[in-house]
Image (cartoon, rainbow, N blue to C red):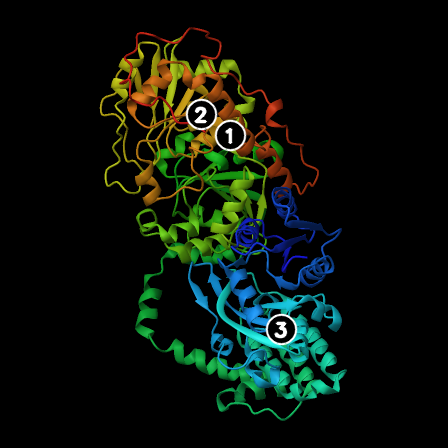
Amino acid sequence: MPRFSVIVPAYKVQAYLPGCLESVLSQSYEDLELIAVDDRSPDACGEIVDEFAARDPRVRAVHLARNTGLGPARNAGTAVATGDYLLFLDGDDTLAPHALRAIADRLKETGEPDVLVHDHALAHWSGETVRDAFAGQLTEQGPAPFRLEDRPGLLRVPPVAWNKAYRREFVERGGFAFPPGQHPDLPWTYPVLTTAESIATLDRVCVHHRRRRQTETAATAGHFDLFDQYDRVFAHTDARPELAQWRPLLFRLMVDHLSAVFTDRALLPRGSRAEFLKRARDHCRAHRTPGHSVPARSRLRHTVIRLGLYRTQRLAELAQGLGRGTAHPLVRLAKALHATALRLHYRVQLRLPLRADRAVFAAHGGRGHGCNPGALEEAFRTFAPHIRTAWIARPEHHHTIPTATARLRPGTAAYWTALARSKYLVANDGFDRRLVKRPGQVLVQTQHGTPLKHMGLDLQERPAAARDLDFDAMLRDVDRWDYLLSPNRHTTLTWERVYPGGYTTLPYGQPRNDVFQRATSEDVRRLRELLGIPEGSVAILYAPTYRDYRRTQHTTLDLDRLVRRLGPRFVVLARAHHRHGGPLVSAASGRVIDVTGHPSVESLCLASDALVTDYSSLMFDYANLDRPIVIHSDDREAYEAARGTYFDLRSFAPGAIARSEDELTDIFATGHWRGSRSTQLRSAFRERFCPYDDGRAAERVVRHVVLGETELPPVIPPADRHPVPSAAAALERPPLTSVPRPAADTPVTETL
């Protein structure tokens, strides 16, 4: 029998669940069982639970046949628990290090109480961690254990299940269970505390409770569930005469709670506040219990709730708003004068009906047709030809836009009309921040690659990389997303954590990679000819990423020297990152071809025979071609310090790793770049990061989002795909031996 049973219900928390489970299993106190309950979650929660159960015998996976909600899911975990004490965690919470040892020590010290109340901290999405405001109630001074009469202030500690440890025998004897509904903690916490014969406290933060973002559309009718839950609280109290003394305080707490919900306009759906107040008034009349004083500062709020004075509350709010509105009239006037005719035009367009047959696309802040939005634009025209498409780009990039697609210049009247009237909006970065997302509009955010380097909210701790990034504006943009594309589980879990919002993730693959499965050998030959790659050459695509810690984006790799050492057979296609500001080479030689300005990186991948990169997400796309990848990482420590990565490439590399120019030269000179070890690494990398890129990603998106289909084309496993081979794949020449070799004491490669 373990000391602790830690019960974790899981529903739509796939981005946080691994961290939650790991925080339990990594505790210094190991006498525990972890019961992870998959509440029929539609995401990968069930798979994550099974993976942890297979890895650690202390984990017990419970899969529910249907989605039951938080309360019944906790009950399902309690039913199979065998520990002395029960602890509950939400699937996105974490246990603080050594928390279980501290709880175990305090339980032993206080004589095995029925309930131990410990402290917690709120972990906000911004990265800030704040200890609970009622931590003072958890002082360990004085006798322990005690009854609630000795410390009634404990009822003011947040009434949640995850800030306490419960003796399992006490729970079973009392018949305590969680009810269904949005707020099941209330009818659990108050009955447990008022019934417990012995209580102890632990003045230590043991749980980090994640405070999820409240998006612009977060208000739901779920708070009306409070009325049913408080009915259950008072029903429990009324059935036990010995608990009658707690009724006045419970009534006061209920009124405080209902008042807090009513006065926070973000918590209730628009138009529902009057109905909420009416039901609150009826509940106060039904459960009113005099006998507990109300502080003067709270009397007005209590009066509004108890008497249902909606008009009085509205007048108070209007008066308060009027006071704020007249504070800076000159500032408001200046802003009004600054408004342009285009903004007026946009406001007019917002009042006109949406056009269900229009879609607008954009990529990389106004650059040309391409990336995932480009592939989706083509798929719209193929699979939903009734949709008229338009592309937003600066004039210098209009030549890249297909003739069948309308061209939009940013900031024009046609641009604002399209944003206001088109039903579908598709981009791989943010649209104009002045965009007003209308009801009925569908925004598809594609992103542009699998994240290796830190992104989104993770940049809050990386000032060199974040620079002037406005996180609030970024999250406002996230709130407008309806769909977010993902090519693999790693990406899904990362995006949902660093871009928290109410969107739906579509794990369909990267549309821009569809071309890799459709291209032919003739396409490869034609592309190489257009780029000027000599026939019979080995073309290396060199594509480094941006360095946040450098003022100038110079490369330490001498490309001319590299091709001289490798010999006449090799050619380098040099492509700088779009933030680089210019080519990688000042004067390209005949065998170093600058392709920075080429409009399609996918075409460059098809034309090449191997990729050399550092930390660029291009490696994940290139792996779909099943062609050699070599990592040139000569500044790993500096890059990690400035930007950070989600995993160490040395532990899961897509191929050989070079730490210097000499090692890179040796990898190609010896043939190691396409050797058996590199092939094995690439195969494992491809299996992990390219599960859905089978050539039909864009089709799946269009069929689901536009056509509303649920039966989508099945995914072809990576082992059964046959991407077009490289031009050098058919060449079976022996490795070059005349290439200068690095010094004998220089390591050749670094792999797993």
- Work out whether residue 582 or residue 736 is closer to the camera in this orientation and state it: 736
Disc 3 residue crowd, few under 14, some 14–19, many 20+, Cα 10 Å: many
Against 235, residue 25 (above or below) is above
Q: Secondary structure at mark 2?
A: loop
Whether residue 25 is visible: yes
Residue identifier under label 3:
113
Coordinates of residue 531 in the picture (x, y in percent): 37, 17
Q: The residue under label 3 is which amino acid type?
A: Pro
Coordinates of residue 193 in the picture (x, y in percent): 64, 77
- Residue at coordinates 62% horizontally, 36% vertically from top-left? 700
Q: Earlier in the sequence, mark 1 or mark 2?
A: 2
Q: CA distance from mark 3 to mark 2?
A: 57 Å
Q: Secondary structure at mark 3?
A: loop
Asked if the residues shown at circle 3 and circle 2 are in contact, with their CB atoms under 8 angstroms apart, the answer is no
- Residue at coordinates 49% horizontally, 37% vertically from top-left? 373
Whether residue 706 is visible: no
Q: Earlier in the sequence, mark 1 or mark 3?
A: 3
Q: Which mark is residue 174?
A: none
- Residue at coordinates 54% horizontally, 36% vertically from top-left? 376
Residue identifier under label 2:
655
Q: How many marks?
A: 3
Image quadrant where one finds the N terminus: bottom right
Image quadrant where one finds the C terminus: top left
Residue identifier under label 1:
685
Q: Nearer the viewer, mark 1 or mark 3?
A: 3
Q: CA distance from mark 1 to mark 2?
A: 9 Å
Q: CA distance from mark 1 to mark 3?
A: 51 Å
Against 318, residue 525 (above or below) is above
